[in-house]
Amino acid sequence: KQDETDPLAQRFAVAQALARRAGNTARRFFLRPESLTPELKSSSQDLVSEADRTVEAWLRSAIARHFPDDGIVGEEEAATAGTSGYVWVVDPIDGTMPFLVGQPNWCVSIGLAQAGRPVAGAIYAPMLRELYAAMEGGGAFLNGRRLEMNADWTLTSTTIGFGATQKATPQEVGRFVEGLYREGGVLFRIGSGALMLAYVAANRIAGYYDPMLYCWDCWAGAVLIREAGGEVTFAGDLARPGPIWAGNASVHADLKRLSGAV
Ligand code: IPD
Ligand code: CA
Ligand code: CA
Ligand code: CA
């Protein structure tokens, strides 16, 4: 049982509750797509809608009500500074593209940083009815069931998640895919980085690489991977995007090598 006076445990409990509630709000938008007008952001495949903005605004006000001294970083609004040392890292809808075309593979991702480190996370996928949650030192869970990554898996044990959007260069994509297939690997992609990281923690894919993610895409997922016994390297931070590699020790090293990082 978690210590209810521990500041991180308190936030972890709130993060899970907010991920569920935000997910249910997003789900209502998802179920009536005719009410949404997709808008372009940086490229033809980088979209946003009223659903993303409404859910983030709701999350921000709920977090500020519970923990007024905490900072908040999120995809759709400017960062809010705090004084407590805790920063909430929120993606109201991770997988906006699948969301807007009626695919069920999208989620709400809520991560927590303490002194810049990922310490807790909750990922809720409403259409899959899956809540992934992890807190530093407390394990990783899917709907209350403990997750433990397969330490024996290799690059070819099952498929490998690859997140590359138009933010990646053709060279980055080409080099990685060519190398992976040369070594017997197979690609997996569902348009939600957060969910693909959760799938690594849940042994549904053997690893994950994305040439460029923001903290809100991967903060919660990184805690899940670590707490499920895996390894994750995010080369970005709370202010800058960067590549991410995740898997067990061997897959993590192989993905770094195949992407040309080492
Ligand atoms: C995107 C997803 C996708 C990743 C992109 C992200 P969004 O987030 O995580 O899997 O490859 O780089 O931007 O825009 O759907 O929240
Ligand atoms: Ca987006
Ligand atoms: Ca995202
Ligand atoms: Ca998003």
Image: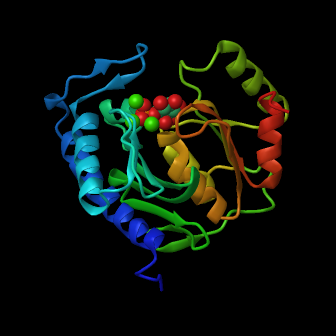
Residue 94 located left or right of residue 238: left
Q: Is residue 55 visible?
A: yes
* Residue at the front extreme, as displayed: 83
Given residues 168 and 118, the one toward you in this image is 118
Residue 14 point in image, percent of width and height:
34, 66
Estimate the x, y position of residue 30 in percent, counting from the top left: 24, 40
Q: Does residue 155 show up?
A: no
Q: Residue drawn 47% across and 41% down?
A: 216
Which quadrant is the C terminus positioned in? top right
Q: Kindly identify the residue that appears in the image at 51 percent across and 73 percent down.
A: 145
The residue at the point 26 percent across, 22 percent down is 38
Position of residue 21 relative to residue 90, above or below, is below
Give the total number of marks visible in the rendering: 0
Residue furthest to the bottom in view is 1
Measured as percent of width and height from the top left, residue 39 is found at 28, 19
Q: Which quadrant does ligand 4 occupy? A: top left
Query: Looking at this view, is 192 or 19 the one in front?
Result: 19
Image height of 230 relative to 179, above or below: below
* Colour scheme: rainbow
At x 57%, y 59%, the residue is: 224
Residue furthest left as drawn:
35
Left or right of 86 in this view: 256 = right
Q: Position of residue 51 (x, y in %)?
A: 24, 36
